Image (cartoon, rainbow, N blue to C red):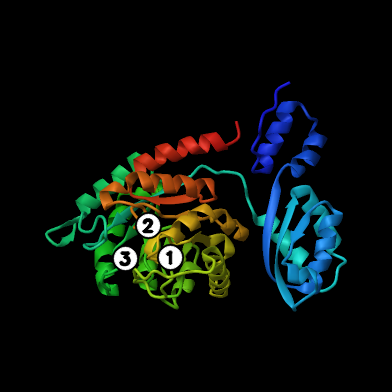
Amino acid sequence: MNIFFREISSLTEAQRELRALGVDSAGVGIMAKKMVMRVFAMKGLSVRAANILKQECIAVGADLALPKAASFLEGESTDAILMANASQLEMLLLNLRAQPFGLRELGEDLNAIVRRIKFAYDKPQIMAVLNVTPDSFSDGGALFEDGRVSLEKVERAIEQAIADGADWIDVGAESTGPTSKDVSVEEELARLQPVFEMIREKRFADRVKFSIDTWKSEVADMAIRHGAAMVNDVTGLRGDPRMGAVVGTGALCALMYSKDPTPRTTRESVQYDDVMDTITTFFAERITYAQSQGVKLEQIILDPGMGAFVSGDPKYSFEVLRRLAELKVFGLPILVGPSRKSFIPGTLEERHEGGLASATIAYLNGASMLRMHEVRAARRSLDVIWLTRSEP
């Protein structure tokens, strides 16, 4: 007799294993749900509700971890960790419908989260970076000639990104890194409008999708009118009160987390009690705000920032990568841009491999879009990862 270990992280993988074994379709539907664990952290649960929930969990074969004090009914509220497989969770959610102390509502919230969380892997979307700036930290001035944006260089860069396999090209004309300088609306439009006019004239949008990297509504509006399909706002709609209305006309909107409320980030080494709790709370508030401005939920993409946008202390960026799957709670696409960021060890020239490794980790943990300078390498490496995770 031989024993083999199987690591099952999704219902799709569980179903595949059971079908390969020859289990009938009804059995696959029942048993696959028993093979995958789900873990939920809860905060601010009333102590009375927590102890009832504990008993309901045990009744279905699941469990709820509680602090010792809460188990002795001390205090008003408590945190908890729920552990259940998909089958146990289904039974638990049914039982909570009849429970008091807010447990019915908690069950409804849990059910909504479960329905939003997606564990399947789509083919990764690669977003190329096109900076028409003189001062971006890694490629500032590369597309300039005689102090002005060179449309010939921009056109060649777009053609190269398409040839390398980009799905998106993110176009920006204002650096937001530490020590970068403010750019007026007039200057940003002067740099970008000829670029987007050329993009429309050459019909590049028929071959690749474009994103506009800006926090200014006037710039976003111009780009959308010229064919941009996404607004990538590093302020998360905090920088310009009119941006929501512009995005609400139909473009996708990437909301990025940043420790700084302004477009200009800093190298401050912010310390977090729990960095993912902070980012998740930020996104919950920003999504609500975006919807209040007319942005539909299906238009929103989430970007956890990375590097100096999170903290000058690199450990938090690595923690974000490690725990990125927690953002699946929103059921929205996740965009990550690790390429050349300062949290990766080494000089700028030495960050190539680290950027690719970070992109791979991000993809495996739930990112569907990766913003990369090294488009060709990212396309090839991430497609191989996708082939290992996709259905045969």
| Res 181 → quadrant | bottom left
- Residue 165 seen anywhere in this rendered image of the structure: no
Q: Is 10 above or below relative to 309?
A: above
- Compared across the picture, whether 253 is left or right of 36 comes to left
Density class for disc 1 (Cα within 10 Å; few <14, some 14-19, many ≥20) is many
Describe the element under mark 3 as helix, strand or loop.
loop
- Residue tagged 3: 177
Q: Nearer the viewer, residue 207 or 275?
A: 275
Describe the element under mark 1 as helix, strand or loop.
loop
Describe the element under mark 2 as helix, strand or loop.
loop
Q: Nearer the viewer, residue 362 or 331?
A: 362
Q: Residue at x 38, y 75 (%)?
A: 262
- Compared across the picture, whether 236 is left or right of 352 comes to right
Please report contact status of discs 1 and 2: CB closer than 8 Å, yes or no: yes
Which disc, if any, is residue 343? 2
Q: Residue at x 39, y 60 (%)?
A: 307
Q: Residue at x 31, y 54 (%)?
A: 130
Which disc, if any, is residue 5? none
Density class for disc 3 (Cα within 10 Å; few <14, some 14-19, many ≥20) is some
**Amino acid at dot 1:** Val
- Residue 198 seen anywhere in this rendered image of the structure: yes
**Amino acid at dot 2:** Phe
Which disc, if any, is residue 310? 1
Mark positioned earlier in the residue sequence (3 or 1): 3
Where is residue 240 drawn, in percent x and y? 41, 76
Where is residue 41 drawn, in percent x and y? 66, 62
Distance of mark 3 from mark 2, alpha carbons?
13 Å
Q: Is 100 above or below relative to 225?
A: below
| Res 116 → quadrant | bottom right
Q: Quadrant of the C terminus?
A: top right
Mark positioned earlier in the residue sequence (3 or 2): 3
Give the label, 3 or 2, closer to the camera.
2
